[in-house]
Amino acid sequence: MSTSPELAAKPPKPPRHPAKRVLPPNPVRAVALVLGFMALLYALQVLNVLTLYSLNSWFGLRPRDLFALQDVLFFPLLHVSWQHLVDNSVPLMIFSFLAMSGGTRQFLKVTAHVWLLGGLLTWLIARPEGVVGASGLIFGYLTFLLARGIFVGSIPQFLIAAVLAFAYGWVFVLVLPSSANPDVSWEGHLCGAVAGVYAAWRVASDYRESLQRTPTPPALPGSLGV
């Protein structure tokens, strides 16, 4: 049986673009990064307990205090109790792991947007009582995962987004003020969510730019070029 020269010369299917991947390209490294960050959070919680939660007073976010703007860098690392940290742990690990699907470099950019932009927005609008906790990161990663699938037009990511929305969609209630949970910083949740959508938009923009820069492969010999 003979083989058509055109079929034999067919170029290999290009690898999936990082913006459209669902799982991290290096799962072992992703798990190591997630567990390393969680170890840091738990170590800081131990130190916080030993100092009678003085770290929250020193490094918790103090909204609209120009002399405390650096708190944006530290407040997601601190929690008000062990239960607060435990409640944040599982969703933070799941969402951050999935957010590494574009690779470590993209994940660091997404984290910078969620952490810094979300923190600055929280600093602008939050109540004066102060804010601590990684909840803003959780909401940022979640909305990043949901919005990315929409912005880049990826069906697998749509499916992942649907599962996340079904499993954790109830948390979006926490982006609104509630008299039932007056101590919950809905402002931090909302700002983290906004920052996550913005991070997804940036990733999609980079994806579209990379497509424009990719040259069109030449037509195969003997083909019609279509």
Image: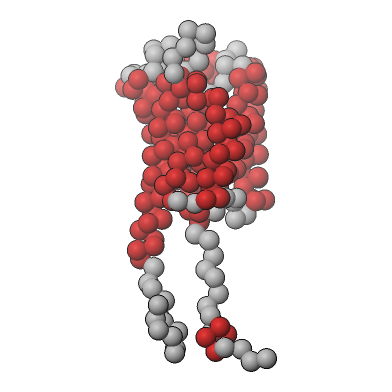
Q: Position of residue 191 (x, y in %)?
A: 41, 27
| Res 80 quadrant in image | top right
User: Can residue 77 be seen in the rendering of this structure?
Assistant: no
Seen in the picture, residue 178 relative to 18 is either above or below; the reply is above
- Toward the viewer: 27 or 16? 16
Above or below — where is 97 with respect to 85?
below
Estimate the x, y position of residue 140 in percent, counting from the top left. 47, 34
Query: Residue drawn at (36%, 51%), measured in percent from left and top?
Result: 205
Residue 27 is left or right of residue 113, and the answer is right
Residue at position x 57%, y 85% in the image = 8
Name the residue at the top extreme: 179
Q: Is residue 111 left or right of residue 66?
A: right
Residue 131 in percent (x, y) is at 46, 19
**Residue 28 vs residue 99, the one in the foreground:** 99
Is 127 situated above or below 196?
above
Quadrant showing the C terminus: bottom left
Q: Quadrant of the N terminus?
A: bottom right
Residue drawn at (54%, 53%), measured in percent from left and top? 21
The quadrant holding residue 124 is: top left
Is residue 55 visible from the viewing direction of this image?
Answer: yes
**In the image, residue 10 lies at what x, y percent?**
53, 80
